Amino acid sequence: MKRVFCLKTKTVKLFLLVVMLCIFLSSCGNQKNKVVVSDLEVIPPELLLEDYDEFWKEFRNNYIFIPILEENGIEIDSIEKKYRETLEKSELDIKGFYSLLEKMLGEMSNFAHLQMVYPGWAQYYIDSEYDWLLNETPEKLDVCRATYNKLQELMPDEERSEQINLMRPQVSHYYDTKTVCIRYMTFSYDEGDRDKGLLLDALSNAYDQMGGIDNIIIDIRGNGGGNTEYWRGSIVGPLGGQSGWNIEIFTKDVPLLVEEIEKESKEGTFESEFTFSRGYGYKPISEYPKDRTLPPFVEQLGLNYYSDEEETIKDTSEGDIDTDGINKYVLIDGYVYSAADNFAMFCKDTGWATLIGRPTSGDGAGGMPLGVILENTGIIFRFSVTASPNDAGELNTIKGTNPDVFTLKEDALTKCLSIISSDG
C-alpha cells in the first residue's frame, strides 16, 4: 500500500508539472503579439502579414476619404495587392516594414494626413493626455514604445531637429511704413514658448526702433503645420484680442470612433450622444439647421454627424504689447497645410487678419489626425476623421483656404507692402 501511495504521488506531481508546462506554453502562445518584434533582424512574415491585413481592414472601415481617392484615379485594390505581394516575398526588420507602409501611403498621396507616424511624432500619440489613438490598450502601448524606441535608433531625427531649430521665426522691419514682418516656417510642437518670447521681443524692439508699429505681417508661406496650439498660444494670444471662432466640422460614425465613444461613455467622459475627447460635441446630420445648406461633400462622403460649436481663442497678452489699431496681414500659399491651414482658416473666418497670396493645401480642421496601432509591430498610422467647408462651401481638404487678396504672378509680400503703402 505504501508503494502504491508513492506511485500515485509521483503521478500527481508529474501531472501537475505537465499542466503547469501547458499553461506556460499556452501563455507564451497568447503572448505572440507581445513579442518585441522590433528587436528581430527578420520579423516572422506571418506577423507582418497580419499587421498588413489589419491596416487595410481599419483603413477601409474608418478612412472617410476613400471616395475622393477613387475619384482621383487612385486604384486602392491594386495598391493593396501590389504591396501584399511585395511583403510576401520580403524579409524585413521593423524599419523595412515601416518603410514599405510609408511608400504605400505615398501612392495614396498621403491625402488627409494618411501617414505613418514617424519617430519624432510618436511621443505625442503614445503619451498624450488626449485620446489621439483609437485602439490603444496598455499592452499595445508597451509594444508601441519599444518599436518607436528602436525606430528612433534606426531612423535618427537629429537632422529634422536641427532644421526646426534653424527654422525659428525670422523678423524683418520696414521703417517707412512702421511694419514688422515675422516669418514662421513651422508651428513646431516643442517651440511654442520660445517663439512666443521671440515674437514679444521682436515687437518690443520694433516699437523702440521705429517709434511704434502700424502693421504686422505674419508670413506662413511654405509652413506645413505642426500644432494648432502653437498659433493660438504663440501668435494670436500674445497679440491680444479675444476671438470667438465658429467652425463647421463633419464626420462619420465609423467603427473605431464608435468603439472609442462607447468605451469613454462608460467612463462618464461624454455629455452628448456622439462626441470624442477632442472636445467637439457632434449632432446627427438630421438636426442640421434648415436655414443652412449642407456642403455637397457631406453626401458624397456619407458623413452623418456635424459640429458647429464656437471656440474661444483667448487673449493672453497680459498688456505686454498694445496692438490696438495695428493692421494684421497673413501671407499664404499652396504649401500651407494642416495646423498652418488651421490658422489661415481662423483668420479667414474671424477677420483677425487679411489673408494675401494663394489658396492653401488645406486639411486644417478638426485637430490632430487620429492614430491606429498595428497589433504585432506597434507601428502607428494616422488619418483625418473630419471634413470642413472653406468659405466657398468646398471641401477644405481639397480646395484649401482662399486668401482675401489673390496673387498670381506677384509675390505675396510685395503685394502686401504695396497695399500697406497705398493705405498709408
Image (cartoon, grey):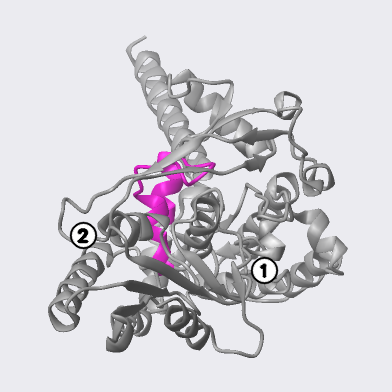
Position of the C terminus by quadrant: bottom left
The label number, if any, that marks residue 322 in the structure image: 2
Residue 126 placement (x, y as % from top left): 39, 51
Q: Residue at x 73, y 30 (%)?
A: 285
Residue 130 placement (x, y as % from top left): 40, 42
First in sequence, mark 1 or 2: give its number: 1
Question: Who is closer to the viewer here, 44 or 317?
Answer: 317
The answer to whether residue 113 is left or right of residue 161 is right
The label number, if any, that marks residue 284 in the structure image: none
Q: Secondary structure at mark 1?
A: helix
Relative to 211, is 245 above or below? above
Question: Who is closer to the viewer here, 203 or 388?
Answer: 203
Q: Residue at x 47, y 81 (%)?
A: 422
Tell me if mark 1 has few (under 14), some (14-19) or many (20+) residues whose alpha carbon lies within 10 angstroms of its own: some
- Name the residue that disc number 1 marks: 105
Whether the magenta-drawn stretch holds residue 137 is answered as yes
Relative to 209, is 126 above or below? above
Q: Residue at x 34, y 46 (%)?
A: 242
Q: Which residues are magenta?
A: 119-144
Whether the magenta-drawn stretch holds residue 386 is answered as no
Question: Who is closer to the viewer here, 30 or 69?
Answer: 69
Count of numbered tags: 2
The answer to whether residue 412 is left or right of residue 250 is left
Mark 1 near mark 2, Cβ–Cβ under 8 Å?
A: no
Residue 26 placement (x, y as % from top left): 51, 38
Relative to 250, is 83 above or below? below
Q: How far is the residue under mark 1 from the one under mark 2? A: 47 Å
Residue 227 placement (x, y as % from top left): 41, 60
Instruction: Please name the amino acid that badge 2 sits on.
Output: Asp
Instruction: Please name the amino acid that badge 1 sits on.
Output: Leu
